[in-house]
């Protein structure tokens, strides 16, 4: 009996400890900081995996499959594209497609609507346009080699550090310089801040206006417009969405699984813009942030039927 009384406390202690090991110290929580929403932030990601062109991707991901054809409006299902194969965005408040022929940019057509239109990395094009306007007087031949490399990285790989370096070369107020470029092409509503341009609102309709002006050589100068169009050719890992329907030039923007993913570009003689707000699964991109690749492919397929 005495031996049992001695062993009982030891048995209870072992059960409380769990598998015979004391729990380790609890690490303090770490919250990610985003000082500049216009830039992709380097969140912890899995070990990098080499991909085409020497670019390192945060996660290995297959090439997006070509989206299934979407029937024109009035045929088939009347549900939205976001519900999986529908034919219309009528009444949809999380997806939008906008387009206008380059031959008549005022003939803008739109389908669907969204309540949030943060620019994210599409704003990088505006930063470069303002740099061209103020730092080199609209003449791309005057761009120094270092700045030329930054611009290429910002507009092809959506490099955040590169666009900050370009922005720092803009004399005076970057926000004022960007806003002046927009006013010069007839955009009277978009206002750019000096920092965090990614968080500014830039509607799909105004993005279509911008792309039409770019194609017409009216952004800064004909030479600057041609230069921007040539640079807006994403790396292979970012060629989803408009890249699946033959866009000749385009730029995308994304951030998290709950926020906007968007693109603007030129497709078959049209200025176009597509946007989804937190629709469908998000895929980690080369910058560590996430884009709604599958839904953007669907919206691009729907847009292609409208352009036909």
Image (cartoon, grey):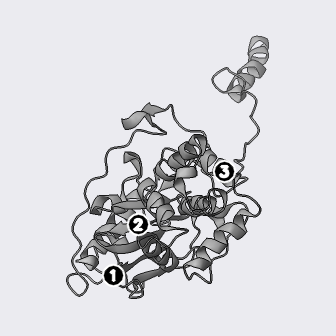
Q: What's the residue at 45%, 54% (across, down)?
A: 231
Q: Is residue 62 above or below residue 91?
A: above
Disc 3 or 1, which lies upstream in sequence?
Answer: 1
Which is more toward the observer, 7 or 277? 277
Quadrant assignment, res 211: bottom left
Quadrant assignment, res 133: bottom right
Element on which disc 2 rests: strand
- Residue 164, which numbered label? 3
Q: Is residue 280 visible?
A: yes
Residue 150's x, y, as percent?
Answer: 57, 45
Q: Is residue 290 above or below residue 70?
A: above
Q: What's the residue at 48%, 78% (across, down)?
A: 209
Camera-nearest label, 3 or 1: 1
Which is more toward the observer, 152 or 11? 152
Q: CA distance from mark 2 to mark 3?
A: 23 Å
Bin the neighbour count of mark 2 within 10 Å (Cα to Cα): few under 14, some 14-19, many 20 and up: many
Residue 214's x, y, as percent?
Answer: 46, 70
Q: CA distance from mark 1 to mark 2?
A: 15 Å
Residue 45's x, y, as percent?
Answer: 55, 38
- Residue 216, which numbered label? none
Q: What's the residue at 47%, 67% (across, down)?
A: 222
Element on which disc 1 rests: loop
Which is more toward the observer, 205 or 12? 205
Q: Which residue is mark 1?
A: 103
Q: Are marks 2 and 3 in contact (CB under 8 Å)?
A: no
Q: Which residue is mark 2?
A: 265
Q: Is residue 51 visible?
A: no
Q: Is residue 25 above or below residue 72?
A: above
Bin the neighbour count of mark 3 within 10 Å (Cα to Cα): few under 14, some 14-19, many 20 and up: some
Disc 2 or 3, which lies upstream in sequence?
Answer: 3
């Amino acid at each position: 009996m005495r031996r049992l009384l001695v062993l009982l406390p030891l048995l209870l202690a072992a059960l409380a400890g769990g598998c015979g090991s004391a729990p380790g110290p609890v690490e303090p929580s770490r919250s990610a900081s985003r000082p500049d929403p216009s830039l992709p932030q380097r969140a912890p990601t899995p070990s990098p995996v080499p991909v085409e062109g020497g670019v390192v991707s945060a996660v290995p991901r297959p090439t997006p499959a070509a989206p299934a054809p979407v029937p024109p409006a009035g045929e088939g299902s009347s549900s939205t594209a976001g519900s999986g194969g529908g034919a219309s965005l009528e009444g949809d408040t999380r997806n939008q497609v906008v387009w206008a022929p380059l031959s008549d940019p005022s003939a803008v057509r739109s389908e669907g609507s969204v309540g949030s239109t943060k620019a994210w990395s599409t704003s990088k094009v505006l930063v470069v346009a303002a740099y061209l306007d103020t730092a080199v007087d609209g003449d791309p031949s005057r761009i120094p080699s270092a700045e030329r490399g930054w611009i290429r990285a910002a507009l092809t790989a959506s490099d955040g550090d590169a666009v900050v370096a370009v922005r720092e070369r803009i004399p005076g107020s970057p926000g004022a310089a960007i806003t002046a470029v927009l006013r010069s092409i007839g955009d009277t509503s978009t206002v750019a801040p000096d920092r965090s341009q990614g968080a500014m609102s830039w509607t799909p309709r105004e993005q279509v206006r911008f792309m039409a002006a770019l194609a017409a050589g009216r952004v800064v100068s004909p030479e600057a417009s041609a230069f921007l169009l040539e640079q807006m050719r994403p790396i292979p890992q970012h060629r989803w969405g408009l890249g699946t329907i033959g866009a000749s030039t385009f730029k995308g923007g994304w951030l998290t699984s709950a926020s906007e993913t968007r693109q603007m570009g030129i497709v078959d003689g049209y200025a176009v813009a597509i946007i989804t707000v937190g629709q469908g699964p998000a895929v980690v991109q080369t910058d560590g942030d996430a884009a709604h690749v599958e839904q953007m492919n669907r919206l691009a397929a729907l847009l292609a039927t409208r352009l036909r």
